[in-house]
Image (spheres, rainbow, N blue to C red):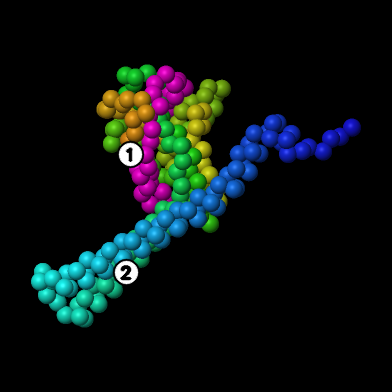
Amino acid sequence: MVLVPTLRHKLFENPIFYLRMADKVWNPILKVYVLVKNIYCNYIIIRYSFFTINLFKKSKFLKCSEKELIQMKNFMIALKLLCFLAFSANAEIVIKDAFAIKSVPTAKSGAIFMIIHNQSDSEEHLLSARTEISKMAHLHTHKMIDDVMKMIHVKNGFKIPAKSMLHLARGGHHIMLMGIDKSLKKHETFDLNLKFKNAGNITTKVIYHGAGMKENSETHDH
């Protein structure tokens, strides 16, 4: 007797089904929120820029004609529009749950994991990473070579298809930190700069989850 699989069966037998459903609901909501936030922030900036110009106009600190004031306003509108377009481009890339671990507290290497959402209509590439707490930050992945799991440096970066996401997780893609020269405390945060092919440079906060995780136990192959 063949049973028709129900939603309950799918959730319990295949958790990935639930994650995909949640992602389809969350992504549009997050995208609208980021867009509205960027529009509001730029509106506030433009409003107070005009306020500052009008204040200078009434004061003795700025001696210029009405035509020059109009040119200043037009320049500031154009500048804010460029900022808005830049913010909108970055809004197509959303980074969630970024955290770092080390094998032991004194280790000079560590790993960073996260989820990167590409909400744009075009393919994106994560090209490189950089942080101030380490001398190097390389994009790494795991690959089976001669029956041995090895960690390799992905020089060409990670591909993120349109309307999709990239999971940086243990046992797969991740960012390897080498030459860590700062003593990190658990739950401390630090900045991570990610360079994308289309979105450019995006800085995000990374939370240090502490030591004890074996993120670098596999064989390295650079």
Q: Position of residue 9 (x, y in %)?
A: 74, 34
- Does residue 86 appear in the picture of this structure? no
Do labels 1 and 2 touch, CB within 8 Å? no
Q: Amino acid at mark 1?
A: Asp
Per the image, the residue denoted by label 2 is 78
- Residue shown at 19% from the left, 69% from the top: 55
Per the image, the residue denoted by label 1 is 191
Marks 1 and 2 sit apart, C-alpha to C-alpha, by: 30 Å
Residue toward you, 50 or 169: 50
The part of the image, by quadrant, that contains residue 175 is: top left
Q: Main secondary structure of the magenta part?
A: strand
Residue toward you, 12 or 160: 12
- Residue shown at 14% from the left, 77% from the top: 64
Secondary structure beneath dot 1 equals strand
- Residue shown at 28% from the left, 25% from the top: 183
Q: Position of residue 96 (x, y in %)?
A: 46, 41
Q: Amino acid at mark 2?
A: Ala
The part of the image, by quadrant, that contains residue 190 is: top left
Q: Is residue 85 above or below residue 16?
A: below
Q: Earlier in the sequence, mark 1 or mark 2?
A: 2
Q: Is residue 216 magenta?
A: yes
Which residue occupies the extreme left position in the image? 60
